[in-house]
Amino acid sequence: MADEISRSGDLGTSPATVAAAYESVAVAAAANPKSRSLWPSVLRWIPTSTDKIIAAEKRLLSLVKTPYVQERVNIGSGPPGSKVRWFRSESNEERQINTVTFDSKENSPTIVMIHGYGASQGFFFRNFDALASRFRVIAIDQIGWGGSSRPDFTCKSTEETEAWFIDSFEEWRKAKNLSNFILLGHSFGGYVASKYALKHPEHVKHLILVGSAGFSSETDTSYERLNQFKATWKGAIFNHLWESNFTPQKLVRGLGPLGPNLVRSYTTARFGSYSTGTTLTEEESRLLTDYVYHTLAAKASGELCLKYIFSFGAFARSPLIHSASEWKVPTTFIYGYQDWMNYQGAQEAGKKMKVPCEIIRIPDAGHFVFIDQPDRFHSAVFYACRRFLSPDPAVESFPEGLTPA
């Protein structure tokens, strides 16, 4: 029956198709009263699975010329002795982190890349070739996202939620036997990378935070405007949805076989007609849309962190700026000019840091700066890592076309 419903979803997205899918589920349920409740059966008509995520990832990464190895790294069922299991699930099944490692030159420095909220490692598809020419590149899907395990998410606090991501990443690091690496995180991935580096600075030799979340605080001027909006009836509704943990992924799932159309509309607009940088080719857009749909429509897990890490408006409940004086890892911030994440928060944090810190801004780029302006993004990363790439980093000039902040 699951296969039948999946095929129904693949036939098209007309109302008749959707109605037929519902009808087939209802008939099957009536014919088999011993079967599970109707709702889990309905979910099966969403045409995705872990295997389909990995297959979509493989199709997207076919655009990358550098050979790579894809693996699902076993990180066990819980960190030894921990009172807070990162997955906080009744299940003791082993968890796996989807990982891709690209071929590199011998003795190249290792860079580990962590994606942002609602994304997966495949979002870096435009960057792997260039970065692999200078680094040993490893990209992961965080637990609960992409092709990684999606355990039940039952965290009930900011501290538990942070541990869910930080501890799972640390167990992955142990399984891969990594140390002394460069850690790059985008958006929410920047938040996780920062929290990880604060807890395990001995393993990270440089931190690159790309449009990182978590550096705005309640003192930000936009926070006052947000409070004014929350006081309106529209703002109250949006805030309620946020606190109820209503995520964009739930909308994609709720649309069933109509979900791909919604995702296609988003990717076409964000990286096409409304792009702030270089637009995607037709093939890139098609493959990215397919990949994004499967990663968003799969079982809810990591996405449910949202309300515990951020308040409405993406203001961190535990702002990183408050921990800036405890920073132990040299850090480079990278922002697009049109990034909705405010780089001024990074400036304020930099003033409190006791380690080297720099901010690089990239023109004609938004929050997905690495997709909007890949060449400029690569230049920024190479410059940020000049200590590890150049025999004489002191003479390296600031890249043309970029702006220091």
Image (cartoon, rainbow, N blue to C red):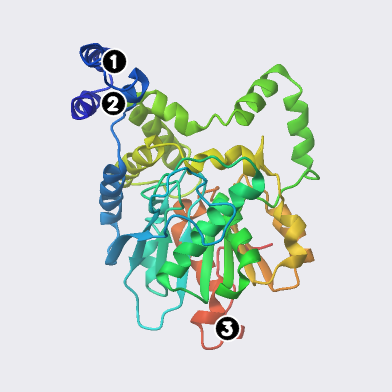
Residue at 52% x, 77% y is: 180
Q: Nearer the viewer, mark 2 or mark 3?
A: 2
* Residue 352 appears in the figure: yes
Amino acid type, label 2: Trp
| Residue position for label 3 | 393
Viewport quadrant of the N terminus? top left
Q: What secondary structure is marked by label 3?
A: helix
Badge 2 element? loop
In-image side of 285 versus 340 (left or right):
left
Report how many numbered discs are placed on residues in the image.
Answer: 3
Spot occupied by residue 350 in the image (x, y as percentages of width and height): 74, 64
Q: Which one is in front in this view, the residue at disc 3 or the one at disc 1?
A: 1
- The residue under the point 54% across, 53% down is 165
Task: Name the quadrant containing residue 134.
Answer: bottom left
Q: Which residue has dot 2 on it?
A: 45
Q: Are marks 2 and 1 in contact (CB under 8 Å)?
A: yes
Residue lying furthest bottom? 391
Where residue 207 sits, quadrant-wise, is bottom right
Judge whether 329 appears above or below 364 on screen. Answer: below
Q: Where does residue 76 sit, x and y in percent of width and height?
A: 42, 58
Q: Secondary structure at mark 1?
A: helix
Label located before the other in sequence (3 or 1): 1
Q: Residues within 10 Å of mark 2 (few under 14, many from 20)?
A: many
Where does label 1 land, which residue?
22
Front-lying residue, 1 or 339: 1
- The front one of 145 and 81 is 81
Residue found 62% across the figure and 60% down from its top: 194
Direction from residue 370 to residue 51 in the image, left or right: left
Residue 376 can be seen in this image: no
Q: Position of residue 346 (x, y in %)?
A: 70, 57
- Specify the quadrant that holds the C terminus: bottom right
